[in-house]
Image (cartoon, rainbow, N blue to C red):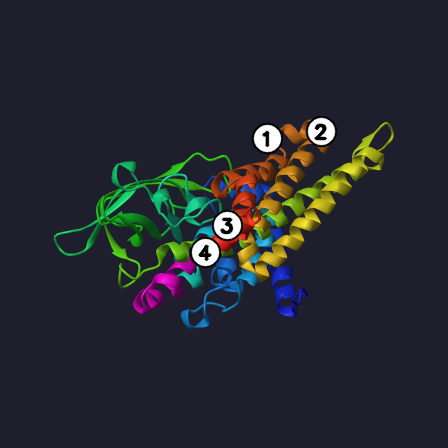
Amino acid sequence: MDAAFTAEQDEMRRTLREILGKRCGPAEVKAAVRTAAGYDPELWQQLSRQLGLPGIAIAEEYGGVGCTPADLALACEETGRALLPSPLLATAVLAAPLIAALGTAAQRSELLPPLAAGGLTAALAVPGPALSTALALTGENAPGEWAGGGRAGGVQARTGEDGGWRLYGEVAQVLDGHSASLLLVAAHTGGFARSRTLLFVVQGDAPGLVRSRQATLDETRPQARIQLRDTPAALLGADRASADVLGALAATGCTTAAVLAAEAVGAAGRALDRTVEYVCQREQFGRPLGSFQAVKHRLADLYVQLQAARSAAYYAAWDPQQGGLALAQALEALRVTAGEAIQLHGGIGFTWEHDAHLYFKRAAADELLFGPVHRLRAHAAHRAGLFTTPQEKVAV
């Protein structure tokens, strides 16, 4: 494994940090999240045109840059530093890989180029607060029970009189679901007896689709409630019998975890930098606050934890199968660093006017969406067989 960054990766990181430094300061972030879209469309288009950000991991034949998920993770480390509110996660990390994996040739040719260009945004709608299970981050998604079905609710898909598909149901906590031009909806087919989960493509202006933005802990990750009332939809893929939807979701979950780990590391790094800068300037008893040994020890512990999380995130970018453990370590580092940042900023750190609370909210919201740290680690340990007895291994 070569852990060194290439010249192209260094240039991408430098350019992205420069753009975000000019266009995505704390004031701009707070203003963007309060718009109807929940992000700055002009900045999104600039990042799409200048860097090809939404198409980094999309193949060149579909208008993308053709890079690896590692490059996308590296870019998301910079967006995490700025807490950039954008449809990048929902579009490029969650939706685009599923379209590439499951879509027909016609669907890939129709949908991936506008997604790569930034003109089309997408969102993944999973029934209930089960996104982490659907992506196989906190539990196996093989049974598909996370999607409801039967009397358990969720979204139902039925064939209409015209032979097309119709969706019925409600989905909450859909990332960027209020503004996405395209929705990928996980729905049940086959009735109660032969129920299975499939993915369907729903246009943002489809009849019977009702969307409302929800109040969220982290405003930089806008979420929506989606209601489907006899809504026309298209099956993602050609054959519902052979579509490996659960496998594609699990594979997407590995990449998503690696990208989220890098993003959390970027946010934690920025929170630590701002805290170090503050304690070096703030004076108490006639000397800088950062000169006290107790403060130095706390900052040193944060630095060590951050560097360990960064190493894990970079390794997961190279091997996405390790994404769950890397995400757990990165989220824990972000939560601890953001909490210490609030403490070390003193009274001002607890105010809404200061930006320290934004990092703490990002850490808490990501754990709510993608799984708490202990469950991420427990599932990773289970998959690795750490708690399997020798007899059980032989039986398997």
Q: Badge 3: how crowded within 10 Å, few (<14), some, or many (20+)?
A: few
Residue type at mark 3 is Glu
Sequence-earlier tag: 3 or 2: 2
Name the amino acid type tagged 2. Gly
Of badges 3 and 2, nearer the viewer stands 3
Whole-angstrom CA distance, mark 3 to mark 1, is 53 Å
Q: Which residue is mark 4?
A: 252
Task: Indicate the quadrant where residue 3 lies.
Answer: bottom right
Front: mark 3 or 1: 3
* Badge 2 element: helix
Point out residue 395 in the picture as x, y percentages from the top left corner.
47, 53
- Relative image position of residue 146 (x, y in whole percent): 37, 43
Q: Decide if residue 263 is on the left or right side of residue 342.
A: left
Q: CA distance from mark 2 to mark 1?
A: 13 Å
Identify the residue position indicated by label 2 in the image.
346
Q: Which residue bears the numbered disc 3?
A: 392
Q: Nearer the viewer, residue 79 or 325?
A: 325
**Mark 1 or mark 4: which comes first in sequence?**
4
Between residue 68 and residue 9, name the one nearer to us. Answer: 68
* Residue 43, visible in the rendered structure: no
In percent of width and height, residue 4 lies at: 68, 65
Earlier-in-chain disc, 2 versus 1? 2
The magenta segment is 96-114
Three-letter code for the amino acid on which mark 1 is drawn: Trp
Confirm whether the magenta stretch covers residue 108. yes
The residue that disc 1 covers is 352
Q: Are marks 3 and 2 in contact (CB under 8 Å)?
A: no
Residue type at numbered disc 4: Thr
Category of crowding for the residue at label 4, using alpha-carbon neighbours closer than 10 angstroms: few (below 14), some (14–19), many (at least 20): many
